[in-house]
Image (tube, rainbow, N blue to C red):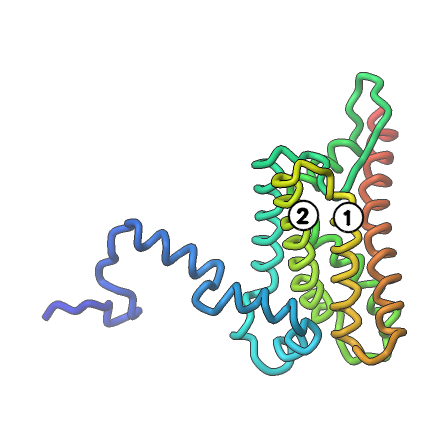
Amino acid sequence: MDSKYCPDCGHPSSIKRIDRKYIIHEIEHVLHFERGILYTIRELILNPGENIRKYLSENRSRLVKPIIFIIVTSLIYTILTHLFHIEDGYVKYHEVNDGTVSTVSKIVKWIQEHYGYANIMMGIFIALWLQLFFRKFNYNFYEVLIMLCFVMGMGMLIFSVFVILQAIMHFNVMSFAGAFGIFYCVWAIGQFYFKSKVSSYIKGFFAYILGMVTFWIFPVIIGIVIDVVSK
């Protein structure tokens, strides 16, 4: 008797042919549209602290997976900057042009072309500072990193909005994008820890800034060491 499934492993005896519906379903599955990426964005705008805390301790099916979220939002920002030819982005690096390309320049260029991975790495540095400033709270390093994936992912969407505004208005507004992005991230971090205390936002601000600074110092040091050793 023919069966649709293997009696040993339970896999289908035959698989459907890959077509348009299959591709659409796979994209929806990766982005978790069926679970509400727009719902996730709305919740992270209205009440990020409470929703992230619920994700960590109660329900992990309501929001998009955090790693996927920050990679996708960073990809959206990267696509928009290339589409509208806004090359400077929200981070600028200038180097004296002497005809050579240093390792630091190569590393910075890679970071600017891979914001998804770079944001996760930056989140590691910010998480370390948050662990230091908020050591009295019972969140481990990985939980803080997950929180930052949501928060920094929303930051990338804020930058994306400014990219679109600049393309429409033909006026440089990207200089304001960083301020708005940092404001949201600091506000969301403060909401996550203790939203009724001003000190939460102050410590969140310094942790975020110090995390960004140490993140950008790290590739510079690595690049300089590589250049010195290779000479």
Q: Which of marks 2 and 1 is nearer the N terminus?
A: 2
Element type at mark 2: helix
Direction from residue 150 to residue 16 in the image, left or right: left
Q: How far across and down, in percent of the image, does residue 187 sit?
A: 77, 67
Residue sitting at the far left: 1
Residue at the spot 59% in from the left edge and 64% down from the top edge: 41
Residue 176, numbered circle = 1
Residue sitting at the far front: 169
The quadrant in which residue 98 appears is top right
Where 92 sits versus 115, above or below? above
Task: Report the quarter where the C terminus lies.
Answer: top right
Q: How many marks?
A: 2
Q: Do tag 2 and tag 1 residues touch (Cβ < 8 Å)? A: yes
Q: How far across and down, in percent of the image, does residue 207 sit?
A: 85, 62
Where 111 sits versus 105, above or below? below
- What distance separates the C-alpha of mark 2 from that of mark 1? 8 Å
Direction from residue 103 to residue 114 in the image, left or right: left
Residue at the spot 77% in from the left edge and 48% down from the top edge: 176
Say what amino acid the circle numbered 2 marks: Phe
Mark 2 Cα-neighbour bin, 10 Å: few <14, some 14–19, many ≥20: many
Task: Report the quarter where the N terminus lies.
Answer: bottom left
Q: How far across and down, in percent of the image, does residue 222 sit?
A: 82, 40
What residue sits right under mark 2 in the picture? 162
> Of 55 and 138, which appears nearest the observer?
55
Residue sitting at the far top: 99
Element type at mark 1: helix
The quadrant in which residue 27 appears is bottom left
Say what amino acid the circle numbered 1 marks: Phe
Residue sitting at the far bottom: 58
The quadrant in which residue 200 appears is bottom right
